[in-house]
Amino acid sequence: MSKPTADWEKVGGRFYRKVKIYQDVFDQDLELENYIVEGAPYSGAVAIYRDEDKIHVYRGTQAAKSSIDIYSCAGKLIRRIDWDRGKIKALGWSEDEKLLVVTADGTVRCYYDLQGDFTPFTLGHGAQEHGVQSCRFWSTGFVALLGNNNLISVTKYDEPRPKLLAIPPEGPVSSWNLIPPAYTLSRSVEVLLAIGQTIHVVDASDSLDQGLQQGPFRHIGVSPNGKYVALYTDDGKVWVVSSDFQDRLSEYNSRAKTVPNHMEWCGNDAVALAWEDEVHLVGPNGAANQYFYNGAVHLLADIDGIRLLTNNLCEFLQRVPDVTENTFKFGSTSPAAVLVDAIEQLEQKSPKADENIQMIRSTLDEAVDACVKAAGHEFNIAVQKQLLKAASFGKSVLDLYNSDDFVDMTETLRVLNAVRFNEIGLPLSYEQYIRLTPERLIERLINRHEYLLALRVSDYLRLPTDRVYVHWASQKVRVSTEDEESICRLIVKRLDGKRGVSFEQIAKAAYDEGRATLATELLNYEPRAGKQVPLLLDMKEDTIALDKAIESGDTDLVYYVLLELRKKLPLASFFRTINTRPVATALVESSAMSQDRGLLKDLYYQDDRRLDGANLLVAEALDQEDPLTRIDKLKSAYKLLADSKENVNVLKAMDESQRLIKMQDGFEKDLGTGFSGLSVNEMIFKLIRTGNNKRALKVQSEFKVSDRTFWWTRLRALVAKRDWSELEEVAKHRKSPIGWEPFFNECLSAGNPRTAAVFIPKCSNLPVTDRIEMWVKCGQLVKAGEEALKAKDMNSLAELKQKATGTTVHEIDAMIRELAKGRRG
Amino acid sequence: MAPHALLDTAEISDKARRDLLQLLEGIRGKKNLVIERSLAGPVGLFVKFSTLQEYGVDRVFFLENDNVDASQKNIIFLARAEQAKQVISVAEQIKRLRRSSSTDHEFSIIWVPRRTLVSDQILEDTGVLGEASVSEYALHFIPVADDLLSLELDEAFGDLYLRKDPTSIFLAAKALMLLQQRHGLFPRIIGKGDNAKRLCDLLLRMRSEVTASEDSGSGSTSVLGLTPSTTLESLILIDREIDFPTVLMTQLTYEGLIDEVFNINSNATEVDSSVIGAVNTPQPTPGSHNSSSTQSPAPTAQPQTLKRKIPLDDKDTLYQTLRDSNFAIVGSLLNKVARRLQISYESRNTAKTTSELREFVNNLPGLQAEQASLNIHTSLTEEIMKHTRTDIFSRVLEVQQNFAAGADPATQNDAIDELINRAVPLATILRLLCLASSFGSGLRAKDLDLFRTAVLHAYGHQHLLTLSALEKSGLLTPRSSSALGIPAAGARHATHGTNYAAVRRSLHLFADEVNEADPNDIAYVFSGYAPLSVRLVQCIIQKQFLTQLRSTGGQGHGNRQASATAAAPSGQGWRGFEDAVKNVRGATFDEAQTGEDKAVRARHILNGSGANSEKTVIVFFLGGVCRAEIAALRFVSRKLAEEGKGKRILIATTGIITGDTVVGASVEERKFGNA
């Protein structure tokens, strides 16, 4: 077993290690130096594309056809995408392994599954006229630099919305880069543009000159945490500054005459420069180390290190993690180092093992933790084992130890080792794995069609497996050459009883592949009615789609289907489709009421719903401004119902309303405005109030208003007019259809007890006590007394006497005496 | 895999607040918020305007006003995506701003409670889909009080019964489903009414779909997530359609009357400042130190009104004691409180030692707050008294009581006719007519024609549409279906409505004697009429009480011994009341939801044997609930607590309504005229 420290190099006080991961990566004939190589984050796939600016060996017409090739890190070709779509200006990856291809005319293709399926979009904002020069990518988006120095940013790919950033100054851009939105203060992407001597920082709203003198800069690199920026000057120096350009942190002189091909950050505290076959690693304080290769080398930066890619090798360059350093550094006396030593002693059956343990007894739990962590950071399986063995040994000595971390780590390492295997080619470091999350790792496996492994990993880590099954089945549906029935049977058999499996997605895949019957068959296994709808619509199974939508109870879905059907079907068959489905009809009605009256009219006509049709016309009449068109609408409503015998009353009302409008029109001409829109009673009220009594009577007879109503209305109108003399005039009538009590009440509450009193004697049908009460309410106690006297009601008189003041006391006294006398006599 | 949490409404508020603020935080910088008017009140219940400001909201506009300006680069729209009208309005405003404003705006649309396909379609058709970033805010239930959840769907009643649009059923199912995912399956779903049945079916269907799509990511909704809950006892679904009269009657509880007279929106009512006094008087409630404008995000362009907003919520302890009381005793309750406060204040004169004095000073803020609250409620009560003392109010009440007691509707015709002639508000008349129709399974055709003419003459011929709409809703129908051949399904259906003559007896819906001060039955909320909806709930959870009531004819607790011998029905669901329930309109259902045995056992082990005994019964009113019913249910809940049944009632609904809302859904607002 080689020493774990064998590949360590010290760069300015810090250890760096270059781990060989894969050998014989690419075909020796592949001239890697002539290719653009881009790697997906978290040790993802590598896309290579021949750099068209470089001369290459002619290998016949076949090879001249350009293509984007997607490899795993181990050099296994995953997919070849033939390219004939114009000049590629940039290739890039998102963190979920979507490949972005940007062409000179501003067209972007987003390949979302490593298998050549893509969604296109365009950048706009003048990209077509000025041409895309280059792009820089971050985990979820990218920025494109146009020929006129304009910058366009895209922040997400599922709903891309290209946005123009602030306009930077003119001038040739010597280099540029960006700070991802997650690391900026403004939370918008910031672009660093090297123009002339200085650097401009451009965000969504501003372009700010940093006022530097040291330019022009040939490379700009931003550290993974967005805190530092490395600048490569024209004279071969590397400057590291803070990303707000306030602090200069270190400087390194490469003494190179030529500008390096790449400059990338390695973790957050070192910068790597790559020339053709030479790599410089610049650590803190300008210390550096150099590596040499015998072929072109490409740098693929990741969050915690750099993957170095040559024809022969795939290596991972990273700072040695602190726990690893403490454990393996020469002469380290950290507890972990002692524990590892102990296990070696133990293997040699030496008593020193126990000695070691006793030495670190007090910090043994730390040592175990450190060994577990260090094991995670190891790529070498033997070293992993050694460390875990050490941890296990240490653990066994401890009385109390929570083994969760240990168990988790062994599980994680099994998964990591499995995916690092050559065939899979995902050399994830532990930190990358934690950041990527197991769920997304499974996603990556699925995209590579490694279903078995994905399934095993899911089971092993207790993650849901439905996505794996669905993807497998969809793929099966796409590529299988068997007959549809047996495919269906196979899929259903395999997926039976599996939770959460979406048959809808599989059916969609089948439909997209042109296997409509298979799609229909698969769709029947989908338990969620709502999910089936969009596909059914696509498959032109309109009525089934509508039924399923209704079944799901989701009105949004029903509306959606209805909208589609409305667009697709001729009106008659649209109506035929909905009128057997009450929910659909109700929804059409309620939405059409506010948005599409015409449709509603047709619907009612078609279904012969005359009353509804007539009501609709009445509603339209209400919207009309002009009395004549209003009457016209009412007339047509009338006509619509005229044949039916059932709606006599409605017809009468429609007729009345026409006459009413006409009449109001006439009044407006004679008496001025204010009549339009009134009801019959309101009109009578207004006419009486304005003193047009004759006209009021005419309205009464025209609309056969009952006397009771008329009298009430007149009473209210006269009280409102405060026309007391007229009210007293009314009082001369012998009889009132509403009795006289309302007159009394209304006048009294209008604050006129005098007029109210006029009506008291007329309320002859009321009991005496009520009338006495009424007189009291009017403040006429004497009258009340007289009423009581007439009724010979001694009790009331006594009560009245209590209420009375001044001279009325005497008057009531007199009455009491009179009554008493009468009784005696 | 934690045991099911107790259902706590505060938790729902917290989540709603967190979610909203998170969405706002996601949009960097200052922003203007354009909010749909009907959402502003509910949102104000759990987020203060000052909090919104902390999250960068500069100004708030109402979507309906269409007046958002270009003062901020970020503009956020918060609206309901279910209604095409709102979506179109959002699209139009984005287009208007894009046209008129020179700034390059960032538009964000937050759809409540979810992003819909139709909204996407509309935005796409109007060409703004690419302009705005769209997100969704799953705001379903909004806690209005600690035992009351509302979806605050203002138009639910009209949608369900007039337009037959089942959107609110779906939204209700979604909301209930979320409760189930959090607290476990309702072990039983019991209910009454056709729409309620639909809701129940939808819940069962959604359950199977959720089980089917327990998809990736949400590891928490594992198999255990959908086992029968240990904290919920059952879900009772009541369809408004089965019991219209309860909402049509004038509510006689304090809160109910405030709602009838002034309207209550999102726990606050607006009263003319001449009634209560100007805003600068000491703040009414102890809990709210901020001026009323912070209670809800007030629109910036608020016109200077003389109205004053009065919060009416749980924080006001005095209000809590008053709100569910019959209005008749509110005066004396207020007097008692006033006297108590007086005594407390006077204690300072008797205070001899410094420590006594200090104690008095310490209590002073509480006393002052209580005094302020007392002043408010005294003024409110006086104002309502003005209303209830009028001749018209008592006439209306008299007619209602007669209907409720089972009088022949025809005997009340003259009274209603007079009210029409006296031009009382249309809603009052319509409520009476609908009441007559619902109680009597429709009006006699002759009467209906007479009233039709009277209403049209008195209030305008546009109400042809109103009356037709009421008929469609099943509120105002002719007694025999053959009289008018309306093809609408609802109208025909309504004639098979609830048979009140039968249930009045079997469920004892009317009590002649009601003790308002110390009620022994829910009938106190309407001073005689016991709401059918709540009686049905009692059929399920208070069987014994109801049986007693039936046998004693509501004569109180006097002969409890005798009634105990009358075998009280036991068992679950509708057991024992099947006959009575048969006379109520619509489908009757009782579904038990069980989980897989394995999961249930696991759940039992997790919860341990000493699982807490208090269980929650959720009563969901589809189509709305009125405050008198809430008061009645709280009364039932208190009674259950006294009996030590270990049950608590949580009321949930699509919205809180009054009779005016019910008939208002049908009223045609336009007139034949330009005035």
Image (cartoon, coloured by chain):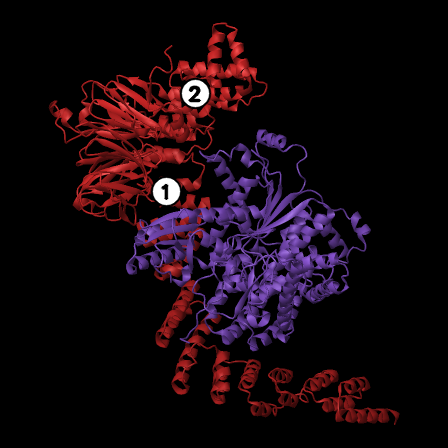
Chain colours: A red, B purple
Amino acid type at mark 1: Pro
> Which chain letter matches label 1?
A
In the foreground, A344 or B583 = A344
- Of residues B577 and B181, the one nearer the viewer is B181
* A555, A394: nearer the viewer: A394
Vertical placement of residue B501 versus B543, above or below: below
Chain letter belonging to callout 2: A
Secondary structure of the residue carrying numbered label 2: helix
Indicate the quadrant where residue A72 lies: top left
The structure residue drawn at horizontal position 46% and vertical position 77%, both measured from the top left corner, is A678
In depth, the one of B424 and B499 nearer the eye is: B424
List x then y, in percent, for residue B373.
63, 63
How far is disc 1 from disc 2 in space, using C-alphas?
Answer: 58 Å
Disc 1 is placed on an element classified as helix
State the mark number for residue A326: 2
Indicate whether B658 appears above or below B391: above
Query: With A715 as the anchor, is A83 left or right in this view?
Result: left
- Left or right, A323 with respect to A789, comes to left
Say which mark, if any, is on residue A534.
1
Q: Is residue B472 visible?
A: yes
Q: Residues within 10 Å of mark 1 (few under 14, many from 20)?
A: some
Identify which amino acid the numbered label 2 is placed on: Asn
Q: Quadrant of the C terminus of chain A?
A: bottom right
Q: Specify the label residue B219 is tagged with.
A: none
* 1 and 2 marks on the same chain: yes
Q: Residue A79: percent from the left, percent from the top?
A: 26, 26
